[in-house]
Image (spheres, grey):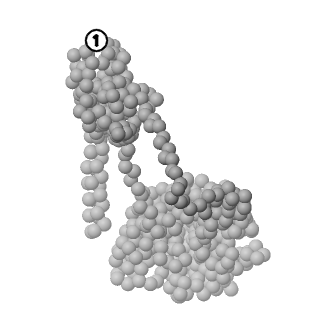
């Protein structure tokens, strides 16, 4: 019995699989975002520490309180005459403090939306404000280069710090101590595209530098367990770092430059504020959604479907049964039929037709090379056959997936048909086009090598600077 003809396989290129880490799977497991257009750039997003984890969005001249379950605005605080800044909750979720470009610091009661206190004393914009851990003091930082501690009961400034030489636009308080604003043995800072980790007890020694962003870092936050650090940047990315190694373990991409973001204490909701005024709200996907969908499908099919799809399932074959094997007729493409009869030229002509994708044509060429009949298939072509071949080579020779095969074929074609140059105007134009394509690819390769050399120099210089 004759063996069946093995059909020609299309050229397959390996796909580089991206390794999915557990952190990447966890932080990318959010539903499609709900987007809300705010009145201006979203400068601050802060989640309430208590359930139901509402979040405050500071944009333009107002602070809006969103319900994290419905993504709807519950309350709007509009006592600001100029841009509001840094709307943040107290640890019990009952009060909210916010600064602004007026130089005032306001404290609001969220149930009644009334302004309980207005602290006056700063002479310029207040970009950062927050409650202390004892709940009875408020801290504020201003463009007047001062940081002030306010008494919530009296409304007076308890302490004013004047050691800064530039604008003060960020604050951090210690949750375990009301007397320390930056404490512990490590703290973090963000400047330009870098996030730096400092050892406070070791004389301010730099422990680590994270340079995964390529534009200014605008916001930092921890997850609920403080095991992961999240940073947002104007490069439209949120990066997630492991605090043990400070290596980037996950990355999220957004359509606009990011100014602020927040993650709920349950890590079920993430809100991201962008420079163009867009607020993106994402909720974590439910784990059992696929199981519920499968259960609904099983119920929908019912008993009738079970009888139809399950028929013959209890049949057991016996010795007297006669089995009939069904042989499907072999369906060969035209170029395979020509290859089966060793008609190399006809097989190549058929594969060069525009109806076949490039990977199929290159697969046929590889088969001809394997058989040693590629020269026979290329030789003896008239103007029409040569034009068809040159058109294909002009289109695909410099393609990375096929260049290893087609460069050898191009060399053979040029050697074989060098004598016919000048006899056909269309063939001459195709040869010139092929020459320009190869020259353009060579120029690109030279530029890439020069770029690699420049990058190597820059990286070596940056590494030396960080080490010093």
Please say if 295 is above or below 197.
above
Pick out the residue farthest to the front.
320
Locate residue 283 relative to residue 353 in the image: left or right. Answer: right
Q: For residue 295, what is the image quadrant? A: bottom right
- Quadrant the C terminus occupies: bottom left
Please say if 59 is above or below 14.
below
Pick out the residue farthest to the right.
112
Q: Position of residue 340 (x, y in %)?
A: 34, 31
Looking at the rendered structure, the secondary structure element under dot 1 is loop
| Residue ID for mark 1 | 423
Locate residue 357 relative to residue 417 in the image: left or right. Answer: right
Q: For residue 352, what is the image quadrant? A: top left
Q: In this rendering, does residue 96 appear at all?
A: no
Q: Position of residue 175 (x, y in %)?
A: 54, 84
Locate residue 228 relative to residue 307 in the image: left or right. Answer: left
Locate residue 217 relative to residue 380 in the image: left or right. Answer: right
The number of numbered discs placed on residues in the rendered structure image is: 1
Q: Nearer the viewer, residue 411 or 368?
A: 368
Q: Nearer the viewer, residue 316 or 353?
A: 316
Q: Position of residue 344 (x, y in %)?
A: 31, 27
Residue at 25% in and 15% down = 420
Q: In this rendering, does residue 309 appear at all?
A: yes
- Quadrant the N terminus occupies: top left
Please say if 160 is above or below 366.
below
Q: Nearer the viewer, residue 258 or 25?
A: 25
Residue at 47% in and 77% down = 227
Residue at 50% in and 85% down = 180
Disc 1 residue crowd, few under 14, some 14–19, many 20+, Cα 10 Å:
few
Residue at 44% in and 84% down = 184
Q: Position of residue 44 (x, y in %)?
A: 60, 66
Q: For residue 67, what is the image quadrant? A: bottom right
């Amino acid at each position: 019995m004759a063996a069946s003809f093995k059909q020609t396989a299309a050229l397959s290129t390996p796909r580089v699989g991206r390794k999915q880490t557990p952190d990447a799977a966890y932080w990318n497991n959010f539903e499609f975002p709900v987007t809300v257009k705010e009145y201006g750039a979203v400068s601050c997003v802060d989640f309430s520490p208590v359930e139901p984890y509402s979040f405050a969005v500071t944009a333009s001249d107002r602070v809006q309180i969103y319900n994290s379950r419905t993504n709807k605005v519950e309350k709007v605080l509009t006592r600001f005459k100029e841009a509001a800044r840094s709307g943040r909750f107290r640890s019990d979720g009952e009060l909210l403090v916010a600064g602004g470009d007026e130089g005032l610091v306001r404290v609001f009661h969220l149930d009644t939306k009334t302004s309980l206190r207005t602290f006056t004393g700063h002479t310029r914009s207040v970009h950062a404000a927050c409650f202390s851990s004892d709940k009875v003091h408020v801290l504020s930082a201003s463009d007047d280069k001062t940081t002030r501690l306010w008494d919530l009961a009296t409304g007076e400034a308890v302490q004013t710090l004047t050691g800064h030489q530039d604008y003060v636009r960020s604050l951090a308080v210690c949750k375990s101590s009301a007397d320390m604003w930056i404490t512990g043995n490590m703290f973090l800072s963000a400047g330009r595209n870098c996030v730096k980790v400092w050892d406070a007890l070791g004389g301010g020694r730099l422990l680590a530098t994270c340079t995964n962003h390529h534009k200014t870092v605008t916001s930092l936050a921890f997850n609920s367990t403080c095991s992961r650090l999240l940073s947002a940047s104007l490069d439209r990315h949120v990066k997630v770092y492991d605090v043990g190694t400070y290596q980037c373990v996950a990355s999220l991409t957004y359509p606009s430059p990011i100014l602020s973001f927040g993650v709920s204490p349950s890590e079920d909701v993430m809100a991201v504020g962008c420079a163009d005024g867009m607020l993106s709200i994402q909720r974590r996907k439910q784990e059992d959604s696929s199981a519920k969908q499968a259960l609904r499908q099983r119920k929908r099919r019912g008993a009738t479907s079970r009888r139809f799809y399950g028929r013959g399932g209890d049949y057991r074959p016996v010795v007297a049964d006669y089995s009939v094997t069904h042989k499907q007729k072999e369906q060969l493409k035209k170029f395979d039929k020509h290859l089966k009869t060793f008609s190399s030229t006809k097989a190549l002509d058929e594969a060069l037709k525009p109806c076949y994708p490039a990977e199929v044509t290159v697969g046929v060429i590889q088969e001809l090379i394997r058989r040693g009949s590629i020269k026979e298939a290329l030789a003896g072509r008239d103007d029409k056959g040569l034009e068809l071949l040159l058109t294909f080579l002009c289109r695909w020779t410099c393609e990375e997936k096929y260049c290893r095969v087609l460069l050898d074929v191009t060399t053979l074609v040029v050697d074989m048909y060098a004598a016919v140059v000048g006899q056909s105007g269309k063939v001459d134009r195709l040869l010139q086009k092929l020459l320009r394509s190869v020259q353009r690819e060579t120029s690109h390769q030279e530029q890439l090598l020069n770029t690699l050399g420049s990058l190597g120099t820059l990286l070596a210089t940056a590494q030396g600077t960080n080490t010093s």
